[in-house]
Amino acid sequence: ALQYLKGAYKKDVIRLFIALGLFPIASWLPVYRFREWILSDIVSGINTGLVAVLQGLAFALLVNVPPGYGLYAAFFPVLVYFIFGTSRHISVGPFPVLSLMVGGTVVRLVPDDSTGNGTSIDISAINEERVMVAASVTFLSGIFQLLLGILQFGFIVIYLSQSLISGFTTAAAVHVVVSQLKFMLQLSVPGYNKPLGIIYTLKSIFSQITDTNITDLVTSLIVLLIVFVVKEMNDRYKAKLPAPIPIELLVVRFKLFLLLFQVPVAPDVGVLQKCIDDSISIAIVGFAVAFSVAKVYSIKYDYSLDANQELIAFGLGNIVGGSFKGFASSTALSRSGVQESTGGKTQIAGIISAAIVLIVILAIGFLLAPLQKSVLASLALGNLKGMLMQFKEVGILWRQDKYDCVIWVVTFLAAIFLGLDIGLAIAVAFQLLTVVIRSQIPRCSILANVGRSNIYRNRKDYKDNYEPEGVKIFKCASPIFFANADFFREKLITAVGFNPQRILRKRNKALRKVRKMLKNGELRVTPVCKATAPGRGLTGEGLLEKLERCAFFDEEIKPSMFFLTIHDAVLHILLKKDIDSSPELKLPEVTLHNGLRSRECMVRFSSLLVALQL
C-alpha cells in the first residue's frame, strides 16, 4: 500500500509539473498580490486597451481588410496568451510587420480585379475573400507555431540575431510607409507582391501624383505631425507623465459603425495550400519579434521565459484569432511599452485591455464611425517611429561589430527590394554564412602579461605589458576544425616567427645520423634522469579524452604538457629556463660521444608540428 501511495504521489507530481508547464497561469495567478498589483494592472490595462483599439483599426489597412477586423486580432490572442503565455509584460495583438506580411499574401491571392472586369468591381465580395485569406494564413501560421512548440523547437530564435531583426523590421517599416501612401493621397495603386515590388509601387504612385486628393493629403499630414509630436513628448517626458498620452484617440471621429462578433469559420483549404511558405515566415517572424521583446522585460524584472511555451501560446492565439476572422498577432513594441510603463505587473493588464477592446466591439462600436483611410494610414505611420529610428543603429553596429553591421544592411536591402518573405530567407542564409566565415577565419592574437600579474591579454590593447623572453602565447578564439586548420597553421607560424617544418627536417636529419652512428657503435647513451616539473596539470571540458581517442599523445607529447592556466605554463617554462642556465640545477640528459645533444627546443617544435598536423 505504501509503494502504491508513493507511485500515486509521483504521478500526481508529474501531472502537476506538466500542468504548470502547459498552463503557466496556474503558477502565477494563485500567488497574485491583489492589493499591491490590481490598481496598477487596471490603469495599465485601460491605457493599453485604448492604444490596442486604434492600432487594430490602423493595422487592418496593412492587411488590406476592413478596419473592424483588426479589433478581432487585438482581442482573441490576448485571451489565449493570458492562459498559456509566460511573459508578464508584453501586449499581444497586431504588429505592423506581420500585418504587412499577411497583407502581401492577401493581395497576391486576391488582387483588386479578381472579381470584376476593371470597371464594376464588387468591393464587398473582394473584402470577404480577403478576410478569409487573412484568417486562413493566420490559422496556418498558428498551426506551425504550435507544432514547433510541441516539438521543442523554441531554440530557432537564436538564429535570428538582433541585428537581423532590426534590419528586417526597419525594412518592413519602409514598406509600410510606401503602402500607406496610396491612402494618404487617395490614389488607385495595385498591389505588387513580388521582387522589386516597392519600386513598381512608387512608380505607380508618381505616375498618378497629379490626381492626389489635396484634402485627404493635408488631413493626413496634420494628423501625422500631431501623432509624431505627441509621441516624442511621451518619450521625452515619460518619467514625469503618469501615463503616455493616447494621442490616437484624439484624432478619431465618431459616427455610426456596426460591428458584431461573427461565428467562427474554418479556414479555406484551397488558400492553405497556396500560402504555406508565407505562413512559415509569418510564424517565425512573429515569434522572434515577440520573444525578443519579452526577453527584454524578463531580464529587467528577473523572471524566466519558456521559448517552447511561448510558441504554443502564440500558435493557439493565432489559431483562435484566425477562426474568428482576425489576422496574425505578435506584440507591438509601442503597445508593450505602454503596458509596462503604466505599471502593468502581470497579464491581468492584458485581460483588462482585451475587455476595453470587447467594449468597443460590442457597445461603442455602434457609435464608432467609419474612419477615413487617410487618417488610419497616418495613425499606422505614427506608430512606426521607433522602427524607423533604427537606422541610427548602423553606425553603432559598425563600431561594435562589422559582421553585425553587414548583416543589418544586407537584411534591410534584401527585404526592401526582394520583399519581406524572400528577404527574410536571404537574411537568414547570409547570417549563417557569416557564422561559417567567422569560424573559418577566426580572430587570432598574441597575448602578453599585463601589469606583471597572472593576467594575459592581447598585447595590442595594453601598453604596460610584458612578454617573457623566448615565450609566445598564441590565442585562437574559435574551435579548430578542417575548414580553418590551414588558416590556424599560417597564423601560428607568423606569430612564432619561423616555420617549424624546417626545424623538423633538420631534427629528422640529425636523428637519422644518430641512429646510423648508434648502429655502427660509434655512439653510446648515458642514462636519463626523469623528473616531473611542478605546476603541471590537466585541462577540463573532456579535451584530454578527445585527444586520447585521436591518438594525439606519444613519447614526446604527453598529457603532462597541458596546464590549467596560461600563467602555470609560463611559470613552468621560466623554471626550466632557470634550470638550464644554472649548472647546479641542471638535470642529466642524453649525451652523444661526438658532442651532439638532444635539444629541448627540437622536442617543442616537433610537438608543435604534430599538434598542427592533427
Image (cartoon, rainbow, N blue to C red):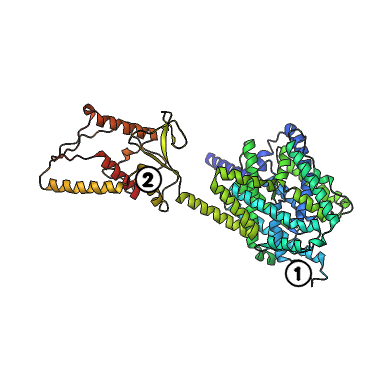
Residue at screen point 70% across, 45% down: 386
Q: Where residue 47 sits in the image (x, y, percent)?
A: 78, 41
Seen from the viewer's position, the closer of residues 170 and 302 is 170
Regarding residue 279, the answer to whether it shows in the image is no
Question: Given the image, on which type of amino acid does mark 1 rest?
Answer: Ser
Q: Quadrant of residue 91?
A: top right
Regarding residue 338, the answer to whether it shows in the image is yes
Please name the residue that numbered disc 2 is placed on: 494
Residue at screen point 46% across, 45% down: 443
Asked if residue 128 is positioned above or below residue 372 in the image, the reply reads below
Q: Where residue 396 sits in the image (x, y, percent)?
A: 60, 43
Question: Given the image, on which type of amino acid does mark 2 rest?
Answer: Thr
Mark 2 or mark 1, which has the lower sequence index? Answer: 1
Where is the N terminus found, in terms of image quarters?
top right
Asked if residue 333 is positioned above or below residue 100 in the image, the reply reads above
Q: What element does badge 1 sit on?
A: loop
Neighbours of disc 2 within 10 Å: few (<14), some (14-19), many (20+): few
Residue at screen point 17% across, 40% down: 596
Q: Where residue 444 sits in the image (x, y, percent)?
A: 43, 44
The residue lying furthest to the top in this view is 584
Q: Is residue 557 left or right of residue 374?
A: left
Please name the residue that numbered disc 1 is placed on: 114
Q: Quadrant of residue 595?
A: top left
Q: Is residue 482 left or right of residue 170?
A: left
Seen from the viewer's position, the closer of residues 29 and 461 is 461
Q: What element does badge 2 sit on?
A: helix
Q: Is residue 568 left or right of residue 523?
A: right
The residue lying furthest to the left in this view is 521
